[in-house]
Image (cartoon, rainbow, N blue to C red):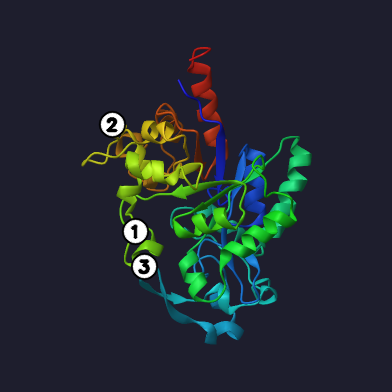
Amino acid sequence: MHVPTILIGHRGAAGYRPEHTLACYELAARLGADFLEPDLVVTSDGVLVCRHEPEIGDTTDVAGHPEFASRKTTRMLDGEAVTGWFTEDFTLAELKTLRAVERLPHIRQHNTLFDGRYEIPTFQELLDLRTRLSGELHRELGVYPETKHPTFFSHAGLPLEPRLLEILRRNRLNRPDAPVFVQSFEVTNLMWLREAGLRTKSVQLLAASGAPFDTVAAGRGPTYAELSTPEGLRGIARYAQGIGPDKLQVIPRKADGTLGCTTTLVADAHHASLVVHPYTFRAENDFLPVDYQSSAVPTDYGRAIDEQTTYLRAGLDGLFTDQADISVIARAELRAATPAGG
């Protein structure tokens, strides 16, 4: 039986702290995550910062800053009108005056305890934290950056890719054996990075429906369903080393919301020499299959360990988790139950 090797702290330890903050990343590392996962966006002065989206109204206290009220605007983000405040309209110094807030307060009320306490970190600050914690914890931590909405930022004249490549080079992390995976839901930017000299591992993110926005914008190119076929996976292997599918592409849910049967995606990806790191595993009932929920209360914890061991038995090479400590237990339980050499 295949045992996964890495646990990816999704946006840090997003189940316990406001996401994409240094406190959140540090907690993920101390809870046992092998990799820390930042979503990367860019400021008006070209600095990569860690935020879930370009729009920051849901993850910061920007709405409470009257000096920035006039910057509220509506932009087209991957074909949809989004109203709020966008990082490309702020310098890094201005963003540093804001503080992070919990993105899902209705589910993670506990995390609101920490609202207003943490800055928006730069990617460099996260890399510096990685170095420090690797020394303190006596194990090398990895980083798993996602280029968020690359077509959007390219059209804004602030492309993410050259900035990411430069910072990896500056930190001596642009090498095949570096503890780095670069990920994207788009295709052409991963190809560009590879051609431009990216030497770390990269991962093509997938979704259960739709298509990469760069292909939508160009009016041609594969859908996520097509990328997920054996032929599509062989194509991905020409520019990436892995896939990051929606976990429902690995084990979908039945019509009644219970967990269904394993698909061939993991086996097909492994046949194409790709690792498989699905997203996102969370402990609250609201995110679990019906048969793994503990109650009708969405915020209660359900049988998250059992859900993760079920998925791990499908042969995953790792997973994205909001609660790394829970995933550490699931991985350990599966290893303990696996016969030597199995």
Q: Amino acid at mark 1?
A: Gly
Q: Count the labels in the image.
A: 3
Q: Amino acid at mark 2?
A: Cys
Q: Which residue is mark 2?
A: 261
Contact, CB < 8 Å: mark 1 with mark 2?
A: no
Which numbered disc covers residue 74? none
Question: Percent position (x, y) of residue 240?
Answer: 50, 46
| Quarter of the image that includes the N terminus | top left
Which numbered disc covers residue 218? 3
Question: Percent position (x, y) of residue 143?
Answer: 63, 47
Could you give the CA–CA distance between mark 2 and mark 3, rounded to whole angstroms?
A: 35 Å
Mark 1 Cα within 10 Å, few/some/many (few <14, many 20+)? some
Q: Secondary structure at mark 3?
A: helix
Residue 110 seen by the camera: yes
Instruction: Tell me what residue is drawn at x 70 percent, y 53 percent.
Output: 127
Q: Quadrant of residue 115?
A: bottom right
Which residue ends up furthest to the left in the rendered image?
255
Instruction: Tell me what residue is drawn at x 26 percent, y 41 percent.
Output: 257
Contact, CB < 8 Å: mark 3 with mark 1?
A: yes
Which marked residue is nearer to the observer: mark 2 or mark 3? 3
Instruction: Tell me what residue is drawn at x 24 percent, y 39 percent.
Output: 254
Q: Amino acid at mark 3?
A: Ala
In the figure, 208 relative to 118: above or below? above
Whether residue 44 sits left or right of residue 297 in the image: it is right
Could you give the CA–CA distance between mark 3 and mark 1, rounded to whole angstroms?
A: 8 Å
Mark 3 Cα within 10 Å, few/some/many (few <14, many 20+)? few
Which tag, 2 or 3, sits closer to the chain's start? 3
Which marked residue is nearer to the observer: mark 1 or mark 2? 1
Residue 288 seen by the camera: no
Could you give the CA–CA distance between mark 1 and mark 2, rounded to whole angstroms?
A: 29 Å
Q: Quadrant of residue 80?
A: bottom left
Q: Which residue is mark 1?
A: 221
